[in-house]
Image: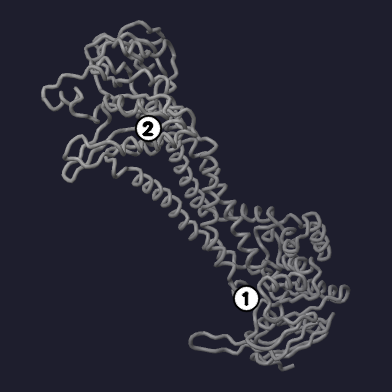
Amino acid sequence: MIKLHNIEKVYRTDTIETLALNGISLDIEKGEFLSVMGPSGCGKSTLLNIMGLLDEPSSGAITIAGEKIDRMSDQQLAHFRNKRLGFIFQSYHLINDLHVLDNVELPLLYRKVNAKERRRLATQALEKVGLSNRLKHFPTQLSGGQKQRVAIARAIVGEPEIILADEPTGNLDSAMGNEIMDILLQLNSRDKTTIVMVTHDEVMAKKTHRLVRLFDGTQVQ
Amino acid sequence: MLKNYFKIAIAILKRRKFFTFVSLFGISFTLATLLVLTAFIEKIVNDDYPDRKRARSLYLTGIEENGPQAMSSSAFSLDYIQRYLKTMKTPVDVAFYSARAGTNTYHAGKKIGISLRYVNASYWDVLEFEFLEGKPFDVQQVRNREKVTVITEDLRRQYFGEDVQVVGKFIEADNQQFRVSGVVKNVPGTTYFFNADMYVPYSVTGVTIETPPTYHDEYSTAMFKGKVQSYQGEYSAVLLAADAGSVAAMQTEYKNVVARLKPSDKMFDKVLSYADYYPDAYLRTGNMSKPLKRWVYSVIGGFVFLLIFLPSVNLVNINLTRIMERSSEIAVRKAFGASSNTLVYQFIVENIILTLLGGIAGILLAMVMLYIFNDAAILPHVTLHLNPVVLVIGLITCLVFGLVSGVYPAWRMSRLAIVKALKA
């Protein structure tokens, strides 16, 4: 599903050059649930961002769902992300000025889905994460766990083949973290969604199919 | 999509109330000023009582003679009007009128300052005065040098009192008694070519085309006896064409008339005089060769530009701050499929919503300002209105505002790298 070949990422400033990813090659199967671990600053999030086409590698090749991501225009990248990828962030990144329902509808806004259908699909996604009773709440009225569930609903509403989750349980206590993890596992087993999850939590990582460890930008496991 | 943008725009407005107030105040105050200004210009430029035939009329304010060492300019002499204007082919009528002369009259021991114009009978045909009672004086009365007058309702009230019929009564001005022939509605101060308190036949001055005045110096007397041709005198004129389509031809004809004029004295080598459309005539004061209009148009243009430009710069600044506060939202939208162009569009739409709200506030504010202006009678007899043209100008101005102040911040924001924005 996702093929990374010899990915390098170098951050350059005027005085210093930092190698964030050093020759990473990965082959993630369709329906696989992969976790990425490593100490802070080892390049986990950079790797996830590159897979999610939110950042460009300095060198190397990426193929997602058979499509080679190479010199896509801004428009094409946006369309690709919209159709195939869903994101879950550690700090949720919900739009506080919009209702839960409007937040979840967001990916559908860029697909020209009509308002009624958007509403139906968003409600359905919120039902899947157990939040159908919070449609008209604002994110600021929700707990951390509830916010992350909204974020998951937003990630799955467009039925993407791949979900990229950057420390989805990082800001939550263990009970809430487990709830979120259960939802992700269910998505993976029931809907066959490919999931790549960056985590610091060994217990969570052990629940996934495969674990990749990074250290100083290099894959060590 | 638009509904979503609208929701966001309103939510953002509510979020930072002080910023919102500053933005909206800037827009609405600017717009209100523009609206009042345009209402004022519109009042001057468009047909206004009693000058209702502007599309068919050309206005002649005066004549200027130039030489290397000398320059002389003034309104027209009666002789000039007779020889050169009344003999033109295109006009169907020629109205002429003197500058306003100030004089005093007394009533019941009370001094009343009045302004007086000497006019011909065509004045009442070319202009459309509204008679509250009586009628204008006619050609025969002018020819007979009858001491008749048309006065305004204001003067009627001051001189005769409230609610009285005054046609046939006498009013004294310049130590002469004039019989009131008619009373007209007051003329706004903005139509300064035509406003006065009292209108009398030009012939009562004793100076007519047929009987020139006696001057003490030989030159002037000779001038009026036709020995020396004189162009300059006391009168301005309005040429009326049969229809709007003939006005250009009338203007050309007058141009040719002026081209054939010889300077009245050897110290001059150039004669300048123009038959203008109303706005040009309004601004052609004094110097014929260097008309005021270019200057006035530049000043108004510059003022409007500054009025729009400065708040726009301010708005750009405020918008940049507001937008950068939303970097997380921008990143999320990009991550979930918004292209940079879509985001630029969203932010411009949001900004236009903001400016339109400011616009509505501005229109309300302008209404209040005009109400106060009219109510306090800052300019006598001038009532300004917000008309549809002014409203459309206002709304277009809002859109320009929205675009000008939204484009740059939106563009800056859309270039934001997603990863950086997510960390912010």
Kindly identify which residue carries mark 1. B419
Identity, as a three-letter code, of the amino acid under mark 2: Tyr
Disc 2 marks which residue?
Answer: B59
Question: Furthest-top residue in view?
Answer: B168
Name the residue at the left extreme: B217
Find residue B203 and report its horizontal and vertical position in percent. 28, 16
Q: Disc 2 or 1, which lies upstream in sequence?
A: 2
Q: Residue at x 43, y 54 (%)?
A: B310
Farthest right residue in view: A190
Residue A25, percent across and down?
Answer: 73, 90
Can residue B157 be spotted in the picture? no
Residue A165: x, y in percent? 73, 76
The quadrant holding residue B81 is top left
Residue at left 16%, top 39%? B266
The local crowd at label 2, few if under 14, some if 14 to 19, many if 20 or more residues have their Cα within 10 Å, is many
Which chain letter goes with mark 1? B
In the rendered structure, the answer to whether residue B406 lies left or right of residue B140 reads: right
Q: Is residue A140 visible?
A: yes
Q: Secondary structure at mark 1?
A: helix
> How many marks are shown on the rendered structure?
2
Quadrant placement of the C terminus of chain A: bottom right
Q: Quadrant of residue B161?
A: top left
The picture quadrant where one finds residue A181 is bottom right
SS type, badge 2: strand
Residue found at x 44% / y 14%: B132
> What colour-coding does the image apply?
one colour
* Foreground tag (2 vs 1): 2
Res. A149 mark? none
B115 and B142: which is toward the camera: B142
